[in-house]
């Protein structure tokens, strides 16, 4: 893993048309080139070149692929992979054959799906009626108890067709329908000379009998739906080999179309260009050279010769850090050549969560949920993400152990002090029973999180300075609020604050270097605009002296205000870490007190189980969100600009890239 984003190189090649197909397949097998249009590099050259055209559109290929993948989902089958497939042996694309096959399979499944639809509609209606009966919402129901004077069997068939429940095996006959269907049922009742019973007890028995019947029908419909689902699945699985073969052909041609959409042409040659990681250059060079047997022209240049904003960003994080790379990508993509934020985010996030949600038992539950969820998604690869998504399951596998470590440090297990604390007993301190060593009360806990926040902010500033040096932005390095000026003032502020606390909040600390350490940065802040004025003037930009004076005064005052208020707010924001930790202990203490008041061991256990479940859900969610917030707004804002765009190569295991 590199601390910085991967070095990139742009490669441009010219090959003969006869070698184009072989080159495309070789490049797809390697899967490391992020293609760009030649026109993006040289718009003048594009006037002399023609663009790629195809008989089969990319949208058509995508539609067929989606149809096949929909069938896979219905049978709970995994989508096959192209990785390792011998591209030379892949059958040719026959769109008409694929269309006919999919149409025939769709027609074969349609009858089963129609049955599914019918059963599902009946199930929904019966479930709705049972809900109204159970909840005693009889205003939505129409219960009729009585007898018919004509053709009893015909009556039953007609009334059932409306979706009503009919109990006609004994007298009197009972019908139950929704009030909104009463117009249809009343018409049938009148036609068959319905006579309503006057026995009130029969009305009550009618609801009870209908409730039992509805439960039976619902269970039967659910079993029927499952049987139909298995029938659909079996029919699709019978065609799995053909579907796999067709999917691979369609997917391969879709990828080829995606690659070739970036190609440009002369009369006999094909030109293409794309970004690759520098350490893959020789592999890609050999790939093109071998495919054309040397009949090609290949040129490349380093990313340093191109504007930084035009270079895609590739981060080399190990696979075990992928959940935290997802957090980074949600915020933005770092600039090319800057520090990879993933490992720093992982460490900061885990520690924050550990301090906010420290419990050995509850952490184990989170770990178990993560492992079970990941196992379930592995067995059901085509299943859609639920409330607990694939990403959340992966994240819980880290956060669960983090919480368990916190529980060991602070002696907490399912809200009880059952285990000796390795650091200090959180429950004892929060509940006012005294602490151990330097941690005696909640103010000491707040102090820990303040110090942790200072470390996080200082780390962010140092990372920003490293990024600015690499980008050669020395002006920002010196004068920016997150540069050296802001760093020095923040360091002075931290020293001053801790000195004031150490003096018992009665006297301010003094040192011979204190005044210069404050004055010099403030002077540099006031010099920022004049220095920027000189730099811009050398570049040919003009600005009046009066405008310079106004900008200097206004910008300097705002910058000073932002440094002092901003850094103070950022640091104090980390008190939420202690706040949530204290709230976690307080909630569990409250549940224990309520459970103890019952005086019954059974109720005690039930209340503590429910309390733990509630805390795991609410506190776990709150700790996760606040850890995310502290990373995004207190840590990332110090060094992470998010102005880059992601490296997106096209390969057999990748995705189609839109041109």
Image (cartoon, rainbow, N blue to C red):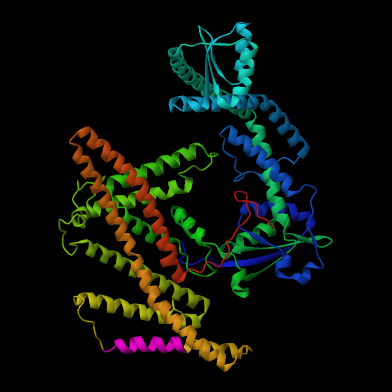
- Which residue is found at the position 31% from the left and 66% from the top? 452
Instruction: Tell which of 51 and 596 is nearer to you.
Output: 596
Instruction: Tell which of 217 and 209 is nearer to you.
Output: 209
| Most frequent secondary structure within the magenta stretch | helix
Residue 300: quadrant of the picture: bottom right
- The quadrant of the picture occupied by the C terminus is bottom right
- Which residue is found at the position 62% from the left and 54% from the top? 30
Residue 107 inside the magenta-drawn segment: no
Residue 8: quadrant of the picture: bottom right
Q: Position of residue 559 (x, y in %)?
A: 45, 80
**Residue interval drawn in magenta:** 512-526
- Which residue is found at the position 22% from the left and 51% from the top? 411
- Which residue is found at the position 59% from the left and 72% from the top? 308
- Asked whether the viewer can see residue 23, the reply is no
Q: Is residue 345 above or below residue 142?
A: below
- Asked whether the viewer can see residue 235, the reply is yes
Q: Is residue 474 above or below residue 278?
A: below
Q: Is residue 132 above or below residue 499?
A: above
Q: Position of residue 181 (x, y in %)?
A: 60, 24
Q: Position of residue 328 (x, y in %)?
A: 48, 60
- Judge left or right: residue 580 versus residue 20: left
Instruction: Tell which of 593 and 427 is nearer to you.
Output: 593
- Judge left or right: residue 435 versus residue 120: left
Image mark count = 0
- Looking at the image, the residue that sits furthest to the front is 198
Residue 519 inside the magenta-drawn segment: yes
Q: Is residue 190 above or below residue 259?
A: above
- Looking at the image, the residue that sits furthest to the bottom is 545
Q: Position of residue 271 (x, y in %)?
A: 75, 62
- Looking at the image, the residue that sits furthest to the right is 267
């Amino acid at each position: 893993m590199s601390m910085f984003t991967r070095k990139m190189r742009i490669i441009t090649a010219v090959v003969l048309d006869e070698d184009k197909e072989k080159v495309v397949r070789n490049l797809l097998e390697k899967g490391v080139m992020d293609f760009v249009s030649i026109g993006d590099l040289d718009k003048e050259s594009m006037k002399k070149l023609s663009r790629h055209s195809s008989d089969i559109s990319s949208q058509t290929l995508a539609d067929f692929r989606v149809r096949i993948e929909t069938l896979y989902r219905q049978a709970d089958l995994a989508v096959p992979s192209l990785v390792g497939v011998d591209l030379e042996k892949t059958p040719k694309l026959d769109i008409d054959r694929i269309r006919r096959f999919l149409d025939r399979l769709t027609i074969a499944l349609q009858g089963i799906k129609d049955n599914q639809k019918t059963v599902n509609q009946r199930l929904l209606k019966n479930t709705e009626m049972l809900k109204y009966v159970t909840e005693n919402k009889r205003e939505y129901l129409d219960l009729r108890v009585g007898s018919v004077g004509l053709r009893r069997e015909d009556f039953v068939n007609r009334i059932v067709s409306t979706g009503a429940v009919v109990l006609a095996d004994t007298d009197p006959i009972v019908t139950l329908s929704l009030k909104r269907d009463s117009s249809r049922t009343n018409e049938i009742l009148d036609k068959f000379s319905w006579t309503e019973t006057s026995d009130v007890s029969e009305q009550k028995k009618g609801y009870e009998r209908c409730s039992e019947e509805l439960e039976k029908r619902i269970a039967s419909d659910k079993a029927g739906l499952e049987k139909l689902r298995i029938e659909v699945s079996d029919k699709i699985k019978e065609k799995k080999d053909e579907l796999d073969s067709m999917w691979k052909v369609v997917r391969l041609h879709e990828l080829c179309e995606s690659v070739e959409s970036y190609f440009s042409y002369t009369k006999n040659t094909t030109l293409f260009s794309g970004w690759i990681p520098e350490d893959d250059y020789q592999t890609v060079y050999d790939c093109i050279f071998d495919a054309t047997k040397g009949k090609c022209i290949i040129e490349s240049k380093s990313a340093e010769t191109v504007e930084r904003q035009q270079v895609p960003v590739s981060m080399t994080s190990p696979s075990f850090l992928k959940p935290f790379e997802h957090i980074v990508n949600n915020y933005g993509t770092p600039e090319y050549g800057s520090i990879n934020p993933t490992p720093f985010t992982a460490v900061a996030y885990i520690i924050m969560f550990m301090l906010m949600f420290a419990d050995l038992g509850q952490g184990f539950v989170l770990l178990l949920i993560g492992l079970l969820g990941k196992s379930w998604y592995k067995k059901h690869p085509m299943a859609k993400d639920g409330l607990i998504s694939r990403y959340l399951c992966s994240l819980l596998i880290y956060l669960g152990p983090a919480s368990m470590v916190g529980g060991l440090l602070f002696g907490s297990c399912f809200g009880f002090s059952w285990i000796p604390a390795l650091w200090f007993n959180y429950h004892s301190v929060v509940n006012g029973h005294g602490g151990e060593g330097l941690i005696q009360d909640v103010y000491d806990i707040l102090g820990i999180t303040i110090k942790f926040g200072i470390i996080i902010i200082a780390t962010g500033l140092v990372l920003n300075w490293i990024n600015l040096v690499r980008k050669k932005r020395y002006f920002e390095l010196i004068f920016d609020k997150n540069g050296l000026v802001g760093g020095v003032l923040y360091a002075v502020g931290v020293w001053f604050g801790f000195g004031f606390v150490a003096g018992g909040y009665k006297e301010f600390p003094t040192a011979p270097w204190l005044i210069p350490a404050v004055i010099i940065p403030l002077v540099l802040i006031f010099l920022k605009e004049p220095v920027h004025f000189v730099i811009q003037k050398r570049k040919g930009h003009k600005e009046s002296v009066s405008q310079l004076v106004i900008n200097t005064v206004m910008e300097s005052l705002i910058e000073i205000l932002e440094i002092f208020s901003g850094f103070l707010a950022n640091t104090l924001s980390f008190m939420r870490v202690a706040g949530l930790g204290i709230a976690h202990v307080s909630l569990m203490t409250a549940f224990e007190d309520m459970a103890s008041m019952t005086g019954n061991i059974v109720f005690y256990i039930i209340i503590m189980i429910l309390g733990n479940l509630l805390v795991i859900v609410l506190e776990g969610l709150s700790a996760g969100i606040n850890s995310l917030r502290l990373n995004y707004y207190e840590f990332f804002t110090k060094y992470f600009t998010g102005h880059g765009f992601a490296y997106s190569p096209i390969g057999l295991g990748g995705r189609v890239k839109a041109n």
